[in-house]
Amino acid sequence: MKPTFLAPLLGIALLALPSQAQSNTFTHTAAQNGWDWTASTSLGPLNGIPDNTFEVAGTSEISLFGSPLNSGQVTSGFFTLTSDLNGYIPGPFGIQLATVNVTNATFTTSTGLFTIDSAGNFSELWTVLFLSGSLTVTPLGGSPSVTDLTGVSAAPSVNGGTITTNSAGDWVVDCDQVSMFSFVDAGTGISADFTISGDFYGTAPVASSGPGSAFCFGDGAGTACPCGNTGGSGEGCANDTGSGGLLSATGSASIGNDDLVLSATNLTPGPGLYFQGNNAINGGNGNSFGDGLRCAGGAVIRLEVQFANSGNNFTSTTTGSISGAGGVSAGQTKRYQLWYRDSGSSPCSNLFNFSNGYEVTWGA
């Protein structure tokens, strides 16, 4: 391997950033997400027709960090109210002063980064934002007034719950959800405070059963590849084969067992350097470098060089002690990556590329 290929590694030194695991898609079914609503208006309370209950269904994207799990973040979601919300403002002698209807409503939700304790408990500020829907107020003897709910956000509120695994090995999020929206109907001048509350419950397959977690992909989900050379799902940026280097691991994260093996596929002929870093660069999305994304940085340690060729189907595997070469201690999280030569028709003409990243939290 030429010294000019390895030399830039000595200069990689980046600020510590939280590692980012692959986002998990949670499914939320209506049967498991029963909600209710309450409201008060400038004319009095709002009574439900026929009642104040409804159900929510959709999906959410939750990034989970650490092995064992120690933090997370709800980054997005798409939820549909499975029924419209209907109510009326009661008046004297049984008359209805106005009817209020919320129709065709969808919303998203998100949080900041939160800590998860050893029992799976967490608490964080949640934001709920309507993506669509209409609020219609029809006063007694008057014409309907319609307000577009798109872009209306609830005041951020603290909600807590748990993220654990079930007997099937799936992630389970179970969180109380309370959000309040304030409205003023422009047509009638009626104002209202509208509170929705219920159970934010969903499941997702556990992304990886290996000794660690893959992160930092060149598949278009995060940082763009340098010259549009997007790789396949979970891979690094594409090399001259049209695929991206794919880094994985087998064995365990036990220092005592000392059996962790890093492996890479979809490579090009030539050398590649397996290296270790402390940090997940750019929040785990990586920065453009050469033909790929540099994912691991900070206190970089060169582990070993391996060659890919036709004899090993253009793959490579580590043969030495990763924990020993990396000088790791129990409780530390380290990030790994393969930096490899692409001496063919390199897509961006830089003649080197990277696999995806892989992070391991080491145990005794």
Image (tube, rainbow, N blue to C red):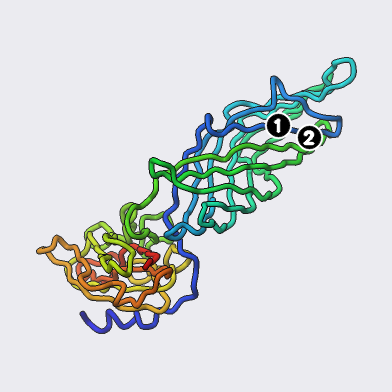
Contact, mark 1 vs mark 2 (Cβ under 8 Å): yes
Quadrant assignment for the N terminus: bottom left
Earlier in the chain: of badge 1 and badge 2, it is 1
**Rendered position, 180 above or below 75:** above
Residue at the spot 33% in from the left edge and 65% down from the top edge: 254
| Image mark count | 2
Most foreground residue, 293 or 363: 363
Q: Is residue 360 left or right of residue 310?
A: right
Snapshot quadrant of residue 198: top right
Snapshot quadrant of residue 112: bottom right
Disc 2 residue type (three-letter): Asp
Disc 1 residue type (three-letter): Leu
Q: Is mark 2 on a helix, strand or loop?
A: loop
Most foreground residue, 238 or 233: 233
Residue that mark 2 sits on: 185
Q: Where residue 206 sits: x, y (%)? A: 39, 48
**Rendered position, 216 above or below 109:** below
Residue that mark 1 sits on: 135
Residue at the spot 69% in from the left edge and 45% down from the top edge: 154
Give the Cα distance between marks 1 and 2: 8 Å
Q: Which residue lies furthest to the left in this view?
A: 311
Q: Is mark 1 on a helix, strand or loop?
A: strand
Q: Is residue 89 left or right of residue 123?
A: right
| Disc 2 crowd, CA 10 A, few/some/many (<14, 14-19, 20+) | some
Q: Where residue 214 sits: x, y (%)? A: 36, 59
Q: Is residue 55 left or right of residue 352?
A: right
**Rendered position, 148 above or below 143:** below
Q: Where residue 71 sits: x, y (%)? A: 51, 58
Residue at the spot 72% in from the left edge and 41% down from the top edge: 181
Q: Where residue 300 sits: x, y (%)? A: 37, 78
Q: In this view, does 85 lie to the left or right of 112?
A: right
